[in-house]
Structures are given as structure tokens and as C-alpha cells.
Image (spheres, rainbow, N blue to C red):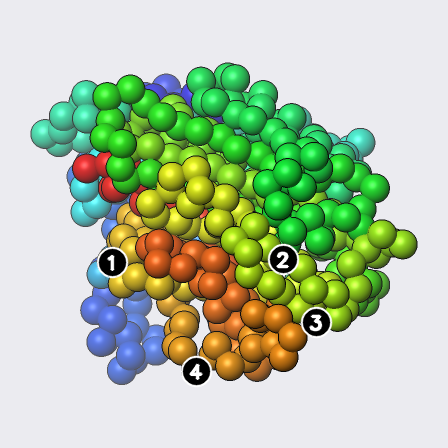
Amino acid sequence: MKTTISLSAPAELETESLVAVVLDHADPAEKEKNKDAKPQLKVASSDTAVQSAAADLLASGEVAGKPFEINLLHKPTGLKAKRLLLLSGGAAKKFASYDLRRLAGAAARTLKSRGIRSFAFIAPSGIPAEDAVRAIIEGAFVGNFDPDYYRSDRKDQKIDALTILTSGNTDKAALDKAATEAQIIGESQNFTRDLVNEPSNRMTPTILGDRAKKMSAEVGLKCEVYGADKIKELKMGAFWSVAQGSDEPPALIVMRYEPAGVPDKPVLGLVGKGITFDTGGISIKPADGMEKMKYDMAGGATMIGAMRAIALLKPKVKVIGIVCATENMPSGKAQKPGDVQIAMSGKSIEIINTDAEGRLVLADGLHYAKQLGCTHLVDAATLTGAVVVALGYANAGIFANDDAMYERIHKANEKAGEKMWRLPLDDEYKENIKSTIADMVNSGGRWGGAINAAMFLKEFAEDTPWIHLDIAGTAWTEEQKPWIAKGPSGIALRSLVQFVKDFAR
Ligand code: BES
Ligand code: MN
Ligand code: ZN
């Protein structure tokens, strides 16, 4: 999708469709008191031509102004556009970039489903122009993605060109820069979603490694993909314990962004769980819903997409991306409950449940990242069903062994428009992963399951400032929404890229 910033008057622009946001200016307190109070709808644009084109409809009483309500006018009076799409954004008082991003996704999805391939979005007054440009472009990319590749009735429907109309006293160069950056982020997020969407027969660890290599060559990253021999040579006993059960070879993917002229430190390590299919292993999962476990490599795919964006955005900080990719299969070679494994760090692990495999591959991934010189670590993983019990589908879980790191990711979440919530890592939980015969068990049981998993990882991050993102509930959108298709969400990519950019300053 091509994106362009235009400073022209909305009325003068020839386009398939103008898109304008409609906000409700009624006093929310008044609405509380009187449920039948009429909305006070206004187009969020100072352009009088657009206002008058929408005036009759907004005055008609037919529009309630609820978020994502859509009204499409053809041949709008006084405008050169063929259509005017009025998109409601709810209460004006609460309207922010977060909402704008989703509205832009909804605009893309509404228009493309009608076979329209281009539109012009009027940046709403009230949101700083640069923020609006970013939100509209990122949101439109999210909305433009559909996962139906393998359907033979797939319609060729997508938005090819998006114009953002901004007005007022704006710095065009700054807006163009914001647009370019947002485009890189949007494309990278969809690149990640493509990887996650592929089923396990089409996204083996080897294929994931090949995709990382191809992407790296395109954007100028160093990338190495190692196989079983290297994993054994590095004594990655935890990673290998998962990989040993599968006929499909594992892949240790290492991507390096080391721009010239930046300080030796910090070095940020982005470590992703890349389980291309999680059967549970010998502790096998029930058949019902097991097909979903193709997305158990979403954390890894997020890191690959984030490295793509970082390589193109060129922040002044070193970053290493590591993905531990393997299947988790039952077989005659598979590890069994009760087995003891020695991780790369030397710590011993008693395997209680072979389905707690993500933490095993990450244990070695985190340790390896430190060995490669990473001074700060972030991992992302579809790690536990328990995080879905705790936070549902709306928030990813954040765990941190360092408050400053937490603050950084929290700020990045706000800028990127992604919701995540911190969960605790108190010493009390360490009891849950004690073993009688080894340094720890790999499963701390049901209660506090997401925390137990994070406590396990903490043993391998040790003193290095570290954040763990549990994206099990958020990496896959269970139901389609106005702004996003059902399927892989690409969660965490935008926050990670923002986190890295902020580190560079
Ligand atoms: N990949 C799963 C977690 C998961 C669950 C991801 C639902 C996405 C949706 C993970 O490897 C797993 O199986 N975790 C177990 C851990 C347990 C055995 C301690 C779980 O959550 O049940
Ligand atoms: Mn599992
Ligand atoms: Zn898993």
C-alpha cells in the first residue's frame, strides 16, 4: 500500500472515497443522566465543505455516533470525491490515537470489501498531525491484511493507495518522515502476521529460518541460521530437549543489527519462541483446538518482523534478534516427563510436563543472547494458557525483573497503541518451580501458571535487565473486528520497535 501526505483542501481532492471521522460532543455526564439524550455529532475536520456535505445526514437523527458506525454517501455535494465515508469514533472527549488507529483499520476493511482500492483519510483535528499520520497509516495496514491465502474463492481485494489529508500549520517534512516510518512498521507487522498465519506444514523451523535469511538480505541485516549440530555444540540442552523429539530439524536464528558509529553498549537482545507446532509432546494436548498451535511461533515471528523494521528505521543502538525454532512432538526420540536436562547456563531442569516447552527453548535463547553480549533482554512468547485466564484477549502479560525496563515498555505500549499489563514476579512464586532432584522443574502447576513460567525464565535472565511478554492470548484474534481480520494480530511488534527507538535516544 502506497501512502501519501497531502495538504490540499479535502473538497478539491479527487478520490474514490474521502473518509472523515465523526465525533459525539454531547456531555458524557449528561448522557449518564438521560439515556435518550441526543448525540451532538460533528465532523472532526475544520473543512467547511466536508462539514456541509455531512450536515444533513448528521442532523437527520439517523446516526447514533457509536464507535465504528459507518455511513457512506455517494456523490457528496460540494466535494470532488466520489464518496464520503463517515466513520463514527464515539465520544469526542475520549477520542485518542488509539481509537484513530482502529478507525483507519475499519475504513480500509469497509472500503476494500466493496472493491474500492484507494481512499483519502482526513486527519481529525484534535490529534497532533504527526501522531495522526502514524496512527492512520499503521491502522490501515492492520486493516488491509486478510489471512485467506489458501481459499480458491479469495477475492483480490485490498487497498493499494492511501492519502492522508492534513491541514493547518504543519511541517510537511516531519509528516513525510512519520508516514515513511509508519509504513515500515505497518509492513513489518503484516510480514510477521504472514509468518504466523502459515500452517506448520508450510512453516517448519527450516522455512522460518529461510524467511528470516531472505528478509535479512533484503534489508541489510546479518543473519545466521544454525541447525542441530550447533545447538548441541553450544550445549543448549533445554532447547535440544524439545527439538530431539521431532523429525523436522530445529533452527537457531540469529539476526544482527550492528550499525556503524553507535556505542558498543547497550546491546538489546530480542528473543522469540519459535515453536512451529506444539502438540505438547509426550504430555500431549487434547485434539480439540490443537490446530491453533501453529501460532506457537508468534513470538519468534514478532522478533523477525521487528528486526526488519529496525533495519529499515536505523535507530542508533545495537540489536540482536534470536529465535529458537522447533516443533514440539511426541515420538520415540521425544523427551519424557521425569527427564533431567542441563541448560546452556549449566542449570539442571526436571521435566514435569513436556508441554511446558516454550520456557525450555527460551531459557537457552536468553542465555545465548547474554553470551553474544546483550545487555538488555526482551522475550516474546505464546507461553501459557494461564495468561489468557488472567488477562483474557485484551492485554498481553508483561513481566520484568527491572522497573526501569518495565517503564520503557509501558511507554512504548502507549505510543504504539498496544495493551499490555504487568504481572508480579515475587520471590514467593519461586517455591512453585523447586525440584527435589534438579535446580528447578519446568512446570509450576496451574495456579499462577503464567507467573511460574516467567519465574522459570527469570532464572536464565539472571541479573540482566529483562522483560518477558506473554502473548498467548493476544497473538491470535479469535473473532474478526471492524479494524482487524480474524487470525494473527502481530501484537507486540509496534511496541518492540518503539522500545528500541526510545533506547537509541
Ligand atoms: N503454547 C502453549 C501455550 C498456549 C496456550 C499458547 C494457548 C497459545 C494459546 C504452551 O507451550 C503450553 O502448552 N503451556 C502449558 C504450560 C503448562 C503445561 C505448565 C499451558 O499453558 O497449559
Ligand atoms: Mn506447550
Ligand atoms: Zn507452546
Residue at x 48%, y 77% (from the top left corner): 430
| Numbered tag placed on residue 404 in the rendering | 1
Contact between marks 4 and 2 (CB within 8 A): the answer is no
Q: Secondary structure at mark 1?
A: helix
- Residue holding disc 3: 352
What is the x, y in percent for residue 379? 47, 51
Residue at x 70%, y 64% (from the top left corner): 340
Question: Mark 1 or mark 4, which is nearer to you?
Answer: 4
1 or 4: tag closer to the N-terminus: 1
Residue labelled 3 has its Cβ within 8 Å of some atom of ligand 1: yes
Give amino acid for label 3: Ile
What is the x, y in percent for residue 191? 54, 32
What is the x, y in percent for residue 455? 48, 69
Give amino acid for label 4: Glu
Q: CA distance from mark 3 to mark 4?
A: 20 Å
- Residue holding disc 4: 428
184 or 376: which is nearer to us? 376
